[in-house]
Image: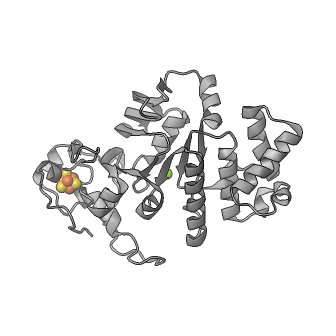
Amino acid sequence: DRYLLEVNGLTTTFQSRDHTFNATDGISFAIRKGETLGIVGESGCGKSVTSLSIMGLIKSPGKITKGEIKFKGRDLLKVSKRELRVLRGNEIAMIFQEPMTSLNPVYTIGNQIGEALKIHKKASGKALKARVIELLQMVGIPRAEEIAGDYPHQLSGGMRQRVMIAMAMACQPELMIADEPTTALDVTIQAQILQLMKDLQKQNNMSMMLITHDLAVVSEVCDHVIVMYAGKIVEQGLVRDILDSPRHPYTQGLLNSLPKSAGSERRLNYIPGYVPPPSQWGQGCRFVDRCPHAMDKCREQLPPLFPIDEAGRAAACWLVEKGGQALVGSSIG
Ligand code: SF4
Ligand code: MG
């Protein structure tokens, strides 16, 4: 198989009090072995719903209503709950933004990592203990024997995220899904954790799906990127192409809101406005109210993804259909 993960037309539907909406609206993408895909967008664009859908963790009344999610050729929407549990943790692992909510406060770090190994790898006794220490060392935790006996609250945020990564790596997953893994951390620690994830990904030839609101993070770590807006993919391609010449006005806006100099926390040029809630999605382009290039047609018709090159680059914008380079380098905000 060419791809480790293939998502085709994924539609995940939720029900709010007065209407039904698709939090992911027919999205498609694929990840090869050893490749890192970034999914970027502001909050409310459907990034987390995408990862939870893949993990089989969408809670009722939310529900996947269309599409397929193929992992190594098998459709995860057709396997049993039991099989999915085995896949989760064993072959697909996930880490989240807030380690405190995923770690159990009443068990030691060593116990929690050991638990994953017991369940998935049937490890026990001395071998189990040795593997726990090995994992803690692998994620750069000093004095691993000592730290294994600590409780989560005794560690810093950065150390807790390293522990979460150790747990995720415990079963040598083929795919790691990381949802805003460094968002809660300060800039220096964030860079260290990203470097660690990159190293582990390379050493293990693991595939990674990294979800973030921050294009700077994508540029550090990812090979390919998809940009999501209001449940849709609006741009996709190689990271270097997208950063060099973003074609969708939303991607341009995200890029322009990055800090101008390294280490600077100031973000100028925020995109004005907000991501529309589903109740405000019209029939046209969902970015229309924030777009400096909006035309009449944009309100009337939803632009499909227009291919830009043979390498899979595409953008969902009527200006791209015209084939002009007009968008390149133009600014927003
Ligand atoms: Fe802007 Fe129109 Fe393109 Fe949407 S389709 S991003 S409103 S120019
Ligand atoms: Mg999210």
Residue 253 image offset from top left, x and y in percent: 30, 64
| Residue 83 vs residue 74, the one in the foreground | 74
Which residue corresponds to the image point at 66% horizontal and 45% vertical from the top-left? 169
Q: Quadrant of the N terminus?
A: top left
**Horizontally, is 215 left or right of 192 in the view?**
left
Residue positioned 24% across, 47% down in the render: 316
Instruction: Name the quarter where the C terminus is drawn.
Output: bottom left
Residue 273 seen from this side = no
Q: Is residue 296 above or below residue 86?
A: below
Report the label total: 0
The answer to whether one can see residue 287 in this image is yes
Q: How is the image coloured?
A: one colour
Q: Residue at x 32, y 50 (%)?
A: 237
In-image side of 230 versus 1 (left or right): left
Q: Position of residue 58 (x, y in %)?
A: 52, 36
Q: Quadrant of residue 305?
A: top left
Q: Whole-percent x and y of residue 146?
A: 85, 60
Location of residue 205 in the rendering, given as x and y in whole percent from the top left corner: 55, 44
Residue 29 horizontal side relative to residue 55, left or right: left
Residue at 41% across, 34% down: 7
Q: Is residue 28 left or right of residue 92?
A: left
Out of 112 and 23, give the one closest to the viewer. Answer: 112
